[in-house]
Amino acid sequence: MFHGSIPALITPFKNGAIDRDAFADLIERQISGGSAALVPCGTTGESATLSHDEHREVVELCIQIAGGRVPVIAGAGSNSTREAIELVDHAKTVGADAALVICPYYNKPDQAGLEAHFRAINDAVSIPVILYNVPSRTACDLLPETVAALARLPNIVGIKDASNDLGRVSLQAALTDGEQFTQLSGEDPSSLGHRAMGGAGCISVTANIAPDLCAQMHKAFDDGDLATAQALDQRLIHLHKAMFFSPSPGPAKYVLNKMGVCSDEVRLPIVGPDAETRAAIDSALVAAGRS
């Protein structure tokens, strides 16, 4: 259903408010660069510090600007099941193509709790749902057996996995209907390996900066041109790493500001990269040919 390079969009700010013009420019840049879909209000979009009204506005803006040219997968998760259902319902109401729903963070539910959470969302709203497993942020891990159980539900269509365990791609494919259940990487540095294991694409931070190169890498893989895909991956690897030299999305916004796309403004408790880190990011840009 979803494939290729899918940016986890940053949310541009200007003087503390959403910069709608910069967001529109960012989306146009993504579509012209070949991105296969868009994800507003993910972790990279600073969803944790958006108000509910801002969250809804960003999703609606993304859908309006995209205008049906590419699918929109709306970030819609919460550590409260009731709140997650409300956000998923909003995504459906305003025309999102799917919802990306993170595992409940901070609460540390067990596998039974995780399954119950996603079952409740599946039962409440009829929209394609992509599970989002990122144990380093949520303090809980959606295990393959639980993923397989959820994949049997009618609205659960895939997973974004940021566990960085490539073996899960094969295991989850073996436990689910691999043709129907979509596996997307949530880790840019291992996204090509994820594709080789059977993944369909990557929800990417780096694509904010280099949408064309990320899209070309996935297209080369789809075309069976592994040498080109590897060459592009090697060109991008330092930039992939640089996006986390300081807390995300600080590095991405620093680069986008250099490119004239938007300001580098982030919201506390995130702060932008310091001078030493900015210099390291600049070196990664040179390696990627984007200085």
Image (cartoon, rainbow, N blue to C red):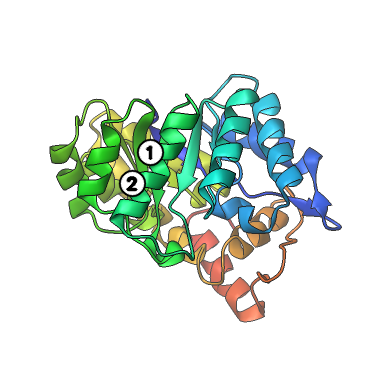
| Residue 19 position in % (x across, y down) | 80, 46
The N terminus - image quarter: top left
User: Horizontally, is 133 left or right of 26 in the view?
Assistant: left
Q: Is residue 221 visible?
A: no
Residue 246, above or below 148? below
Query: In the image, what residue occupies the spot 25% across and 54% down?
Result: 143
Query: In the image, what residue occupies the spot 59% across and 19% down?
Result: 68
Q: Is residue 18 visible?
A: yes
Q: Which residue is mark 1?
A: 119
Q: Which residue is mark 2?
A: 115
Residue 79, above or below 174? below
Q: CA distance from mark 2 to mark 1?
A: 6 Å
Query: In the image, what residue occupies the spot 15% across and 46% down?
Result: 171
- 151, 13: nearer the viewer: 151
Query: Residues at badges 2 and 1 in contact (C-beta under 8 Å)?
Result: yes
Q: Quadrant of residue 29?
A: top right
Query: What amino acid type should be assigned to the residue bearing mark 1?
Result: Arg
| Residue 250 position in % (x across, y down) | 63, 64
| Residue 267 position in % (x across, y down) | 72, 64
Q: Residue furthest bottom?
A: 276
